[in-house]
Image (cartoon, coloured by chain):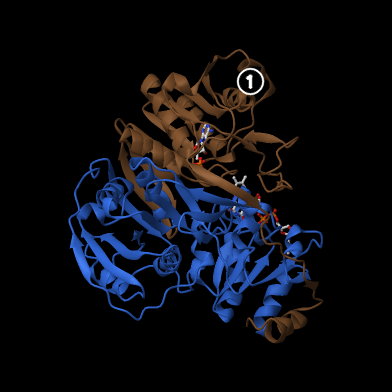
Chain colours: A brown, B blue
Amino acid sequence: MKVLVPVKRVVDYNVKIRVSADGSGVDLANVKMSMNPFDEIAVEQAVRLKEAGTASEVVVVSVGPAQAQDVLRTALAMGADRAILIATEGTTEPLTVAKLLKGVVAEEEPGLVILGKQAIDDDCNQTGQMLSALLGWSQATFASEIELSDDKAKVTREVDGGLQAIEVTLPAIVTADLRLNEPRYASLPNIMKAKKKPLDTKTPEDFGVDVARRLNVLRVEEPAGRQAGVKVGSVAELLDKLKNEAGVI
Amino acid sequence: MAILLFADHDNAALSEAAAKTLTAATQIGGEVDILIAGKDAAAVADEAAKLAGVRSVLLAKGDALEQRLAEPTAALIVALAGDYDTILAPATTTGKNVLPRVAALLDVMQISEVIEVVSADTFKRPIYAGNAIEVVQSGEAKKVLTVRTAGFAAAAADASAPVKTVEAGTEGAELSRFVENILSVSDRPELSSAKIIVSGGRALGSEEKFQAVLNPVADKLGAAVGASRAAVDAGYAPNDFQVGQTGKVVAPDLYVACGISGAIQHLAGMKDSKVIVAINTDEEAPIFQVADYGLVGDLFDVLPQLESQL
Ligand SMILES: Cc1cc2nc3c(=O)[nH]c(=O)nc-3n(C[C@H](O)[C@H](O)[C@H](O)COP(=O)(O)OP(=O)(O)OC[C@H]3O[C@@H](n4cnc5c(N)ncnc54)[C@H](O)[C@@H]3O)c2cc1C
Ligand SMILES: Nc1ncnc2c1ncn2[C@@H]1O[C@H](COP(=O)(O)O)[C@@H](O)[C@H]1O
């Protein structure tokens, strides 16, 4: 079974971004970019399936600018076999990405697509569910455990009340949550090897998808700030402040 | 203009998230119908019918809807969508699972985690772990949104709307099968609606210590217990305790962060709390930059003292 993993190039999770002065967006000049952390978890899961002999091939795909090749190479260094870049300019919305991925699925015919649950830049948490809808496939979001059998996957999901186990029919869409696994670091020899693995470039036109944005971002604002308060010297002082100053206990 | 609100419940009781989402729906303006999809959920529909400002409650019954799995639930909502301009749900794990599927089937972009209704077609939502707020306008024929409930008060429950039964198909039901729920049981208040939250981080060191040190304080305060990702990853607390960008977003009156450094991903989930207390041995910890009251000290000394002085 072939496994497809969509990976997004995003601002590194350690970076505290700044809203641009004119309110048109977020300042991304000279900011460190990385693979979306949830997508690292998705790649790790796919590679483990291959190592276990369950998956035959792991294909990674990214929709983004030419620099998104870097995150594809990282995925190849982690153990993916092949990469596809769908070259776009500007930001693409989840619905557009899902339509492009539908096109990739039609060509590659994977038995399983593992996405991240959420991109940490747009914080949308939509793409996997949308792809599943467009394909008419089953979906298992926020996965913390996946057990594959012949034509089914049992997936444990992280939900608000705890955990939920469901069984989905393959082919299926799974989105990875934080506890699914701990992604490996690519070793130097594997990083070297990854440079020779195949990376194809395609365009949205190849899939007949219109990438025009649907939502109009009017402006981007600074969030309400919070001031550091005071340091208290003792538990007694803390309790006094909470009772008599803040009035919250 | 009509609005369909897809509500959360457990077939026995309506989630408070529904009443909060209703407030957002009322701000958008228009007649609001609440959809209760479930099995034997008539009591939930009656509860929803009491919420102020509801035109009617739609009750869809079916075995496939008992757990509101994404495929049949999205098919149901899409079947009802013709009568509505806006479809919304709380940004709970159920809402986040189902609504993007609905949006794609309707060929519209969803607006996730709305924190403010600017007008009927313009909304504010956080991006980059809440470090920026996007003001976004939708020109879509139908608006599909999830609502971050922490920012909205619950609508009153002093009305009585009619409950109508709607036909639920079985489309999509063959794709997924519910196996089991492994839910956390606790006598404490629910994290997302608690007035006070005591939250623990990596510094707690083990599940035993997490419980031995935090629970007595939480019990005295009548508080819910939360955790950082590091504490959940290490197994000190269950996944549903996680507060943050990719966990729960909370805004209690009082949030007590114990042995939590204050990474942006954690702050994203709690920085709208009314009063924040931080207890940390490192006076440089970033959590102090958002804390109203900071206590530099070892939580293993501070929390037992706190408990005995409460
Ligand atoms: C994609 C992604 C999503 C994430 N989502 C979330 C999320 O939703 N929620 C979240 O919380 N994190 C999230 N994180 C993780 C986040 O980046 C931090 O790693 C995490 O919040 C750190 O947890 P912590 O503060 O408990 O641990 P640490 O950062 O290790 O901090 C421990 C703190 O305890 C203090 N301490 C140590 N001993 C004591 C003592 N005896 N008494 C008092 N203080 C003590 C230390 O000084 C330190 O400040 C996410 C990360 C990624 C990459
Ligand atoms: N531009 C993209 N290229 C490849 N995969 C993407 C892209 N955008 C989103 N995804 C995938 O969809 C997941 C969820 O993204 P989102 O819906 O934007 O939060 C990510 O974790 C990726 O797996």
- Image position, residue A34 (x, y; %): 65, 34
Where residue B144 appears, as percent x and y from the top left, is 40, 51
> Horizontal placement of A238 versus B274: left or right?
right
Q: Is residue B234 left or right of residue B92?
A: right
**Where in the figure is residue B162, as x and y percent of width and height?**
23, 72
Q: Which residue is mark 1?
A: A190
Quadrant housing the N terminus of chain A? top left
Q: Secondary structure at mark 1?
A: helix
- Foreground residue, B157 or B212? B157
Given residues A9 and B283, the one toward you in this image is A9
Q: Position of residue B60 (x, y in %)?
A: 22, 59
**What residue sits 71% from the left and 87% below the top?**
A244
Q: Along the line of sight, which residue is nearer the eye, A179 or B40? A: B40
Residue A74 appears in the figure? yes
- Residue neighbourhood size for the residue with mark 1, other residues' Cα within 10 Å, grouped as few (<14), some (14–19), many (≥20): some
In the rendered image, which quarter contains the C terminus of chain A? bottom right
Image quarter of residue A223: bottom right
